[in-house]
Image: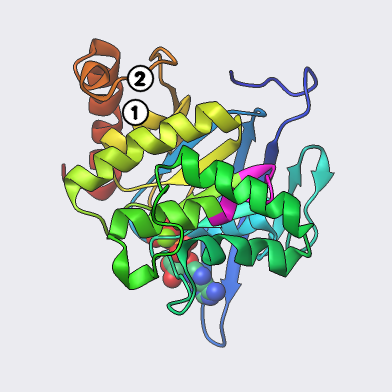
Amino acid sequence: MSVTSGTTTSAVEISDVSVRFQSKRTEVTAIQQVSLDVAPGEFVSIVGPSGCGKSTLLKLVSGLLTPSSGSVSLLGEQVRGPRHDIGFVFQRAALLEWRSARRNILLQAEMRGMDSAEAGRRADELIEMTGLSGFESALPHELSGGMQQRVALCRALLHQPRVLLMDEPFGALDALTREQMNVELHRVWRETGTTVLLVTHSIAESVYLANRVVVLTRRPAVVQEVIEVGLPAERDYSTTMARPEFASAAAHIRDLLGAVTGHD
Ligand SMILES: Nc1ncnc2c1ncn2[C@@H]1O[C@H](COP(=O)(O)OP(=O)(O)O)[C@@H](O)[C@H]1O
Ligand SMILES: [Mg+2]
């Protein structure tokens, strides 16, 4: 599923991008000459040491941040400011406490002025797809952490974004819930065909979900290696974990991260 420039329009094209943050006395280079092509419908995981520039990379794709040099394009169109055709999921679901699950999802439609009947249909479809049926009118405090993240995922997908950006979305969940969310997300990705960029600290998660895993170095982040995950599209969790392709990709990523962080 990797893309060679020129054959098809990339969903995301990051070309030779550098980001420097300037403050009065210091200049921090967060990202240095990073290039990455993501094909439409592809799932790419991004791993790297803390503070290396992963969130910065996602902010560039969403247009929240402008590169110091280089360029970012979404489906062939250069990103010049905040984009409305992306979806973002963060570590915290950030739901409005006084709104039901369904009305939190519909917030996206209200902000974007979507047709309310269509938004309602789409919300119901996503609620069903993510296993939230029966919890539509629950308030956030009545939902588990995993369910809150499902609501955040539905909200991010409501407007059918061209690209879904996820920044450590399951980092605050317990291990078992996280595995369940991985299985859910994999299924939702296959059903929707959305292009996904996922930043994660979990090597298992990065491999289980992705077509490719991008390993970044310590700051300033450069692409250390891009690993093609040779797993079949159908990924039953336990079977996938036991596959030799899974073990070898995970071990390789662990070695790469160990080499840049100085411990394993
Ligand atoms: N707005 C900003 N101003 C100054 N420095 C920043 C800003 N955003 C991020 N940084 C710095 O850039 C580096 C990369 O940050 P970040 O992308 O958040 O890392 P990661 O998500 O990989 O942990 C860090 O050293 C961080 O302190
Ligand atoms: Mg981050």
Q: In this view, does 107 lie to the left or right of 260?
A: right
- In the image, is residue 127 above or below residue 115? above
* Image disc number at residue 208: 1
Judged left or right of residue 233, residue 250 is left
Residue 95 included in the magenta stretch of the image: no
Name the quarter where the C terminus is drawn: top left
Is residue 160 found inside the magenta-colored segment of the image? yes
For the magenta stretch, what is the residue range? 155-163
Q: Where is residue 152 in the image (x, y as percent from the top left)?
A: 48, 58
- Residue 235: which disc? 2
- Residue at image x 67%, y 29%? 40
Can residue 33 be seen here? The reply is no
Residue drawn at (37%, 47%) of the image: 200
**In the foreground, 253 or 92:** 92
Give whichever of 158, 176 is nearer the camera.
158
SS of the residue under disc 2: loop
Q: How crowded is mark 2: few (under 14 residues within 10 Å), some or many (20 or more)?
A: some
Q: Which of marks 1 and 2 is in front?
A: 2
Q: Quadrant of residue 155?
A: bottom right
| Badge 1 element | helix
Residue 244, x across and y down, in percent: 23, 11
Quick check: 61 above or below 242? below
Q: Which of 222 and 12 is in front in this view?
A: 12
Please name the residue shown 19% across and 16% down the image.
242
- 94 is higher (above) or lower (below) than 234: below
Is residue 112 shown left or right of residue 140?
Answer: right
Kindly indicate whether the residue at mark 2 contacts the one at mark 1 (C-beta within 8 angstroms): yes
Mark 2 CB in 8 Å range of ligand 2?
no
